[in-house]
Amino acid sequence: EFCKGVNGLDKVVLRESRGSSAEVYLYGGQVTSWKNDHGEELLFVSSKSIFKPPKAIRGGIPICFPQFSNHGSLEQHGFARNRVWSIDNDPAPLPTNSTSKACVDLIFKPSDDDLKIWPHSFEFRLRVALGPGGDLMLTSRIRNTDAKPFTFTFAYHTYFSVSDISEVRVEGLETLDYLDNLQNKERFTEQGDAITFESEVDKVYLSTPTKIAILDHEKKRTFVIRKDGLPDAVVWNPWDKKAKAMADFGDDEYKHMLCVEPASIEKTITLKPGEEWRGRQELSAVPSSYCSGQ
Ligand code: BG6
């Protein structure tokens, strides 16, 4: 279903027969809503988000490409998140075992102006699909359509909605090495138990497992992130001071969001002419009582 979103921006609404849904804006190729079959919103979008180019939408799942954060000379998080994507009329066929009709294929190709900023031509195809159980799947395929190789970094900058950040734990990253963006990207090793939150955090965890869990104790909900082709995972919460400094983010909203971002940052990705890269994240939200041992 194709319709108008905030400020007249085009969006696609996906509905799965058991009641879950998702919304994808062509602006940024950005998922801005993911609801379970009870109609509960699972992603965070700021009430202060501007929904107007050139500022990226604050929340949902921004696509960071061709550069994560300030790891390079491009604008912060690259330019894919503030360009208008198109519907892809020539998508790859769905896998034969796939039953999902709640699916949209988008494509982003650089404009002449984009090529002045980053002189590499590519086709970026993004498939967003809702599974029968309400799982949200994002598959990115980036093809080098240029005559020379190029190198990039990437992240699904996923903003999860949580009831109270102080009650949240992340499992799957303990004992891993990380680069701390708050300490000049220096490398440290995570100690001890699951990760909890009591101040600003901005870390790039390295060589992470394919499965990471976010436990929301108060909501009795666990998000499970499964990823493929994305070895790193960024964990970000701006906390109070940085929240106040962001024009498109409410002062207290940091309490109700957490970004866990499947990414490829430390290991940059290089594509030769004609080569294609794939990166996938699959999100599910399950009642905590169903997760044995958690
Ligand atoms: C995170 C980065 O992924 O995104 C942070 O690690 C950054 O350093 C945050 O502050 C938000 O970025 P932006 O550009 O959307 O405000």
Image (cartoon, helix red, strand yellow):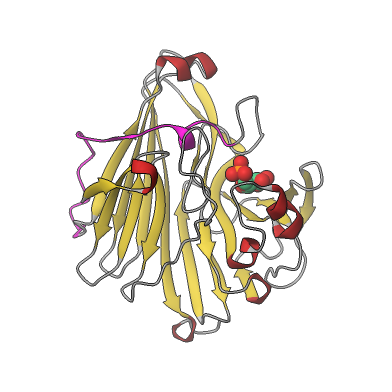
Image quarter of residue 196: bottom right
Q: Is residue 222 part of the magenta span, yes or no?
A: no
Q: Is 158 situated above or below 161? A: above
Give the extent of the magenta segment.
77-99
- In screen coordinates, is 85 left or right of 163? left
Q: Is residue 79 part of the magenta span, yes or no?
A: yes
Which residue: 76% across, 55% down?
Answer: 241
Residue 169 pos. (x, y %): 63, 72
| Secondary structure mainly formed by the magenta segment | loop
Q: Is 67 situated above or below 117? A: below
Q: Is 135 situated above or below 46? A: below
Ligand 1 image position (quadrant)? top right
Which residue: 32% across, 67% down?
Answer: 134
Q: Can see residue 13?
A: yes
Residue 68 pos. (x, y %): 59, 38
| 167, 255: nearer the viewer | 255
Which residue: 19% across, 68% down?
Answer: 17
- In screen coordinates, is 27 left or right of 269? left
Quadrant showing the C terminus? bottom right
Q: How many marks?
A: 0
Residue 141 pos. (x, y %): 37, 38
